[in-house]
Image: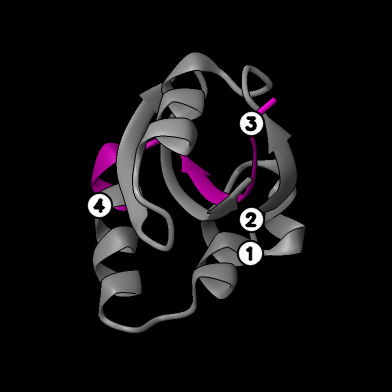
């Protein structure tokens, strides 16, 4: 079964999600922004979700994790929880 190491930032607002993505692209620290802004319980770990198996996350996030490029911040990705920025550290 496919697995990945993933981190994400979850916010309620698409505009904020886009602003955070821009800040990360400009060199700000993903983990620091996750701690400050993410509404997920993973925020305290800098957005780290750890090892994820295919099918473990909600469908829109799962599709990104197992089809998009590694080492890139993807998003905003909309789910029933809000808007996510997702980074796939690596898949195996």
User: Tag 4: Cα neighbours inside 10 Å, few (<14), some, or many (≥20)?
Assistant: some
Disc marking residue 35: 1
Q: Quadrant of the N terminus?
A: top right
Q: Secondary structure at mark 3?
A: loop
Contact between marks 2 and 1 (CB within 8 A): the answer is yes
Q: Which residues are magenta?
A: 1-16
Density class for disc 3 (Cα within 10 Å; few <14, some 14-19, many ≥20) is few
> Could you tell me how far apart the alpha carbons at marks 3 and 4 are, in whole angstroms?
29 Å
Locate residue 54, reporting x and y percent.
Answer: 62, 24
Could you tell me which residue is drawn at 34 percent across and 61 percent down?
20
Residue denoted by label 3:
2
The answer to the question of whether label 3 and label 4 lie on touching residues, with beta carbons closer than 8 A, is no
Relative depth, front residue between 9 and 92: 92
Residue 41: x and y in percent read: 74, 44
| Quadrant housing residue 68 | top left
Q: Which residue is mark 4?
A: 18
Q: Residue at x 28, y 38 (%)?
A: 14
Query: Secondary structure under badge 4?
Result: helix
In three-dimensional space, the C-alpha distance between marks 1 and 3, rounded to whole angstroms, equals 28 Å
Residue under the image location 59 percent in, 70 percent down? 31
Q: Is residue 5 magenta?
A: yes
As helix, strand or loop, the secondary structure at mark 1 comes to helix
Decide whether residue 71 is among the magenta residues: no
First in residue order: circle 2 vs circle 3: 3
Q: Give whichever of discs 3 and 4 has the lower sequence position.
A: 3
Instruction: Find residue 10 and report its horizontal and vertical position in percent.
Output: 51, 42
Q: Left of 40 or right of it: where is 84? A: left
- Residue linked to disc 2: 47
Q: Are marks 4 and 1 in contact (CB under 8 Å)?
A: no
- Of mark 4 and mark 1, the one earlier in the sequence is 4
């Amino acid at each position: 079964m496919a697995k990945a190491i993933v981190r994400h930032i979850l916010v309620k607002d698409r505009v904020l999600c886009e602003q955070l993505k821009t800040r990360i692209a400009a060199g700000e620290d993903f983990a620091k922004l996750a701690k400050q802004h993410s509404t997920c319980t993973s925020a305290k770990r800098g957005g780290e979700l750890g090892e994820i198996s295919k099918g473990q996350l909600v469908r829109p996030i799962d599709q990104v994790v197992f089809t998009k490029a590694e080492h890139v911040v993807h998003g905003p990705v909309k789910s029933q929880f809000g808007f996510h920025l997702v980074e796939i550290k690596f898949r195996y």
